[in-house]
Structures are given as C-alpha cells and as structure tokens.
Amino acid sequence: MRTSTGEVLTDPAALAAFLAEHRLGASHGAAAPTDADLARVLALRQETRALLEAEDEDEVVAGANGLVARVAPRTTLLRDDAGAWQWFLVTPPDCSAADELAALIGTGLLGALRTLSHNRFRPCSSPVCHGLFVDTSKAGRRRYCMPGLCGNRLNVASHRARRQATERPAGS
C-alpha cells in the first residue's frame, strides 16, 4: 500500500475493476472476485514486496520462480488487439486471480532481474510513500514509484518553498 494514496483494493469490486483494467480474471470469463480472493491478492502483494526488498538476487529468483510455479503457465505467441505479435502468459481457465497475478508478477520480476539487474529494484524516494518499483527507464535514474504523483508532489512543495522564500520581506 502506498501511504500517500491509500489502499485502492478495498473490496472485491475494486479487485474486479483492477482485473478488468488489466484484462485478467473475471474479464475473460472467471467468476467475480470474492473476499477470499481479495485476501489472497493482498497476501500476494506482501510476498511481492518482500521480493522487491530482498537484498540477495538469488532470493528474488527463488521467490519469483515459486510465484510462477503456482499455476505452471505456458507462454505462447499471439496477436494482440492491434494485430502485432506478442508473447502471452496463459494460465489455466480455473486459475484464481491471485495465482494468475502471481504467475505474471513472478515472470515480470524474473525478466527484469535478467534484463536490468537487481539494483533496479528500488523504494520510492518520496518521504510520504513506501512504494517499491522496478526502474525500467532507459537511463536507470527513476526515483519515484509514480512520478506523476510522488515526484510531482515533491516538485510542487519545492516550488512553493522557493516562492515563499523569495516573497519574504528583507530582514525578516
């Protein structure tokens, strides 16, 4: 959970909206999420956080491999909505939302670790956010989990502080 934005997965309906937004779970025929599904997804978030915070990349690999192995997904090359060829991770139709997310998260973490390295797993630099992210930027200099929110808040605060400092009368 980001302390700056609060919990967004507050109930099964919010989880259903998240899954639909990302074309997962109920969006392709699975049953609507339940309270138990929400609890499993929130527990998965904690597992993922532990992997992002791990100091040892071997620990990340073991944990991410464990996430992927939960449902033994298969990869396949298919056309996306725009007609371009894309790799897809296919999970069984009876797969729970948490297990589908685990497979996707695990695969993503393994790919990021292999391609970018473990030093790209970072905490957000905002003092009011406890978010974590994988820096996929080309230069590898990203500082915020959500630059448009966390980074913008700091930039606005800095701007206001500078403006307030220049508006003070001399000698005060």
Image: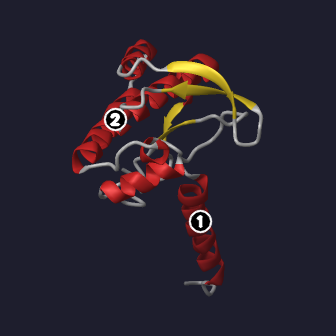
Q: Secondary structure at mark 2?
A: loop
Tell me which colouring the rendered structure shows. Answer: secondary structure
Between the residue at mark 1 and the residue at mark 2, the CA separation in whole angstroms equals 45 Å
Q: Which residue is mark 2?
A: 96
What residue is drawn where x is 45% and y is 25%? 106
Q: Amino acid at mark 2?
A: Ser
Q: Secondary structure at mark 1?
A: helix
Q: Height in image: 159 above or below 131? A: below
State which tag comes first along the sequence, 1 or 2.
2
Quarter of the view holding residue 64: top left
> Residue 96, image x and y in percent?
34, 35
- Name the outermost residue toward the left: 36
Query: Is residue 153 shown left or right of residue 55?
Result: right
Q: Height in image: 72 above or below 28? A: above
Q: Is residue 66 visible?
A: yes
Q: Height in image: 37 above or below 4? A: above
What residue is drawn where x is 36% and y is 31%? 94
Quarter of the view holding residue 156: bottom right
Residues packed near mark 2 inside 10 Å, few (<14), some (14 to 19) or many (20 plus): many
What residue is drawn where x is 23% and y is 50%? 35
> Residue 171, image x and y in percent?
59, 84
What residue is drawn where x is 29% and y is 47%? 38
Q: Amino acid at mark 1?
A: Ser
In front: label 1 or label 2? 2
Q: Nearer the viewer, residue 159 or 47?
A: 47
> Residue 101, image x and y in percent?
42, 35
> Residue 172, image x and y in percent?
55, 84
Quarter of the view holding residue 82: top right
Q: Which mark is residue 158?
A: 1
Query: Is residue 135 shown left or right of residue 32?
Result: right
- Name the outermost residue toward the bottom: 169
